Image: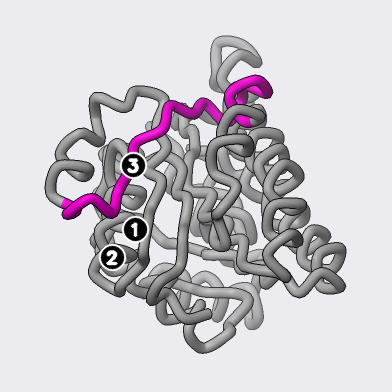
Amino acid sequence: MDIKNTVALVTGTNRGVGRAIVQALVAAGASKVYAAARNVDGVKDLVASSGGKVEAIALDITNDAQIAAAVAHCGDVKLVINNAGSNHASGCIAADSLKAARAEMETNYFGTLAMCRAFAPVLKSHGGGALVNVISIVAKATIPAYGSYSASKAANLRMTESVRAELAAQHTFVQSVMTGAVDTDMAKGYDGPKNSPAEVAQAILAGLASGEEDIYVGDMTGWINGALASDPKSLERELAKFLPG
């Protein structure tokens, strides 16, 4: 996909990776970028510095009415990047209740699926387009300290594969993005190597240009993929060491 002159929508743009994606799209020549966020006050600077190319829209992807409003307002979109996510950084058993797990699944799986379903007809109306789901390498190998988050991302990955197959006939390209640890608020408790949000954004754009369906960003993803291929049970035990205490 050629980003130049493309109209795009990006969710979760008030921080981290989402902000970097908006900036990268503008720099690559996108004609317009809808910067979606629960609180649009957080993206005012992106709008102000974009030369009229960025428009802020209020969007909580767990809110069906707000998704419908976004579809009605953003009918010119040819690229949708689902970046919004939720991470409560808790184990499956250690969590006080199921509240965090339900919130993660509501955003990371159901919310992302709702966006795919809502914007698929919009992309079809333009003869096709692209959907990008920013996921995480924990979709393939669980970090137990982020147990319910890992489960929600695994559900996202399986859903993305299904959506890819379903939308192929309408010429809509579907990309999954597997990140390692990224230097954002979501990974503030992780002390290992982290990629910058800008690196993730550039990898997404490079993948769109080359037509790669599955993008892996960072050394952490390479290590996990290699370990999964060679000795997955050893990897499981290694990742269990990240449990607190």
Task: Kindly check if marks 1 and 2 are in contact, taking CB atoms under 8 A apart as contact.
Answer: yes
The residue at the point 41 percent across, 32 percent down is 57
Q: Residues within 10 Å of mark 3 (few under 14, many from 20)?
A: some
- Return the mark for residue 55: 3
Query: x, y percentage for residue 47?
Result: 22, 42
Query: x, y percentage for residue 199?
Result: 28, 69
- Which quarter of the picture shows residue 107? top right
Residue ID for mark 1: 21
Q: Give me the C-alpha separation between circle 3 and circle 1.
A: 14 Å
Query: x, y percentage for residue 197?
Result: 28, 58
Q: Amino acid at mark 1?
A: Ile
Q: Residue furthest bottom?
A: 210
Residue ID for mark 2: 24
Task: First in sequence, mark 2 or 3: give its number.
Answer: 2
Residue 135 magenta-highlighted:
no
* Residue 9 in view of the camera: yes
Q: Which quadrant is the C terminus positioned in?
A: top left
Q: Give me the C-alpha separation between circle 1 and circle 2.
A: 5 Å
